[in-house]
Image (tube, coloured by chain):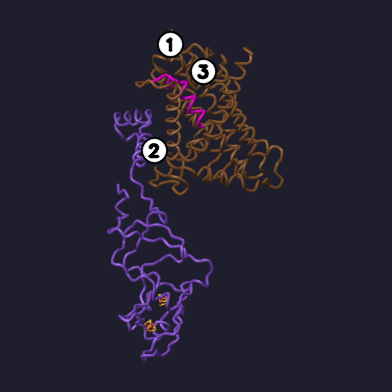
Amino acid sequence: MLPLTQTLKNKPTQILSQWIGWAFFRDLASGLSLTLSYMFSKTVTEQYPDKEKWVPFPRYRGHHFLNTNEEGDTNCVACELCAKICPCDCIDVVPFEDLKGNRRPKVFDIDLGRCLYCGLCEDACPANAIKLGQHYEYSCENSEELTVGRDVLMGMPRKSELGGAVFDASLSTIDGVHVKEVENGQGRDWWQDIRRN
Amino acid sequence: MEELIPIVVLLAKLIVVIVVLLILPIPLTWLERKIAGHIQQRLGPMRVGWHGLLQPLADGIKLLTKEDHIPAEADRFLFKIAPIVALVATFALFVVLPFGESFSVFDQEITLYLADMNVALLYVLAVSGLHVFAVILGGWASNSKYAILGSLRTCAQMISYEIPMGFAVVGVVMLAQSMSLVSIVEAQSEVWNIVYQPLGFTVFFIAGLAEAQRIPFDLAEAEGDLGAGYHTEYSGMRFSLFMISEYMVVVFMASLTVILFFGGWNDFLVPLPSFVWFALKVGFFIWVFMWLRFTFPRYRYDQLMSIGWKVLLPLSIANILVSGFIMS
Ligand code: SF4
Ligand code: SF4
């Protein structure tokens, strides 16, 4: 109810119509009609992990991967610059010389539990080897598993051009828990489903 | 042998009513969560069964296997008996509720109610007050500040809505010239009471919301400020007894609204079996109860009391006066 001074300023007809409105629950009815329209509008729930999955934009900094060259060997020259610049000190590189005489990492461990995903390692790398991808599902049963080695990093998915959309997906528990996107072209723009009024 | 048939029929009806009432909370919890979800543009339960239909069963298993905890220094006897009082009081309400027109099988008339009392309405008003005792006992026995605050609020709330509620149904009794629920429904076979008694319906419905302790009058529970109110300390099976009785009160209030104001099982446009019509109308009102729950915030309890005493009571008395003048 409006304060008395406010009510006195209004014209008598306004006051009358206000009271008639209150008597017939006009304010309650407008609330109810709003919730009724919401009840039958589209929902915004993203059915992760059962049916849908959000694939982040390509600029997203997620799980690292190591780029490979045409021979399937890693680009990394084991210069250890990434290990030096890393503010969390979570990269461990041990170099060796392979049969072709190239300097390559024998050990390349990243402790993903300590990484803060700043992307400095990506910036520092002179060989365009280490990159941060769009993968973000890390679930595992103990924290040691969060330290991943060279071969895992080489096998991680590369940056995908798609992204910034919700894709159809399905949950798979083979080889760790992952949600795999179903390849069917363009995803759905999730933000479009949110009512703006 | 002949004399035994009515008893067998009565027992069969009793069993059907009890089974249906015990099963009803299962779909209702699902419905409530779905409605809550969709009003908030969520989906509600989706993972157990098709669209989460089996979710209540999963919840039931969880509740049954939970630890049954009684707080230290609680009044153990009252604590144990409160959920049972809640359940018994609500079951007792359904004794007088007619579900449909009577029909005959093998020359035996089957009535779709357990008892047709000539003072059914009085019985309903009296017994529905008993449910409040369970809430008071539960809160008192828990030895917890939230629970006791919940019961105190119930005590304060109870008088302020039961009196307007009693007055609101007087108009219906005057129209039907009877307090039996069956005759009240039969009196509405032409025109439903809502046409003659819109004010009575409004008062009754608002008081009914308070009676069922639903938002906007769920002061005894008040998740926001009291944890869970009177059943804060309850867990497992005892908690689920409270939940079942709460849903049954909702079903009962919806049925009573239908019987008193919306023509009971009388059909409307489409001829369907009487109990189907009854179930459809009751379902609609249950849905309205849930819709209200997720639309409105909660009233303070002094506000509820001023609504009860200053608005509902005068309105219900005015309703009786006006009905009396028109009828004479
Ligand atoms: S993203 Fe940052 S914290 Fe993570 S490994 Fe690279 S440099 Fe270290
Ligand atoms: S990933 Fe790049 S920065 Fe790190 S050791 Fe290899 S080449 Fe050097």
Q: Nearer the viewer, residue B186 or B52?
A: B52
- Circle 2 marks a residue in which chain? A
On the image, the x and y values in percent for residue B14 come to 59, 24
Colour purple belongs to chain: A
Q: Are marks 3 and 1 on the same chain?
A: yes
Q: Which residue is mark 1?
A: B325
On the image, the x and y values in percent for residue A143 come to 52, 70
Q: Looking at the image, which residue is at 40% across and 53% down?
A: A47
- Circle 1 marks a residue in which chain? B
- Residue kind at label 3, given as amino acid type: Leu
Work out which quarter of the rendered image holds the N terminus of chain B and state it.
top right
Q: Which mark is residue B181?
A: 3
On the image, the x and y values in percent for residue B106 come to 52, 14
Q: Nearer the viewer, mark 3 or mark 2?
A: 3
The CA span between labels 2 and 1 is 37 Å
Q: Residues within 10 Å of mark 3 (few under 14, many from 20)?
A: many
Work out which quarter of the rendered image holds the C terminus of chain B and state it.
top left
**SS assignment at label 2:** loop
Residue stretch in magenta: B250-267
Image-based side of A193 in relation to B215, left or right: left
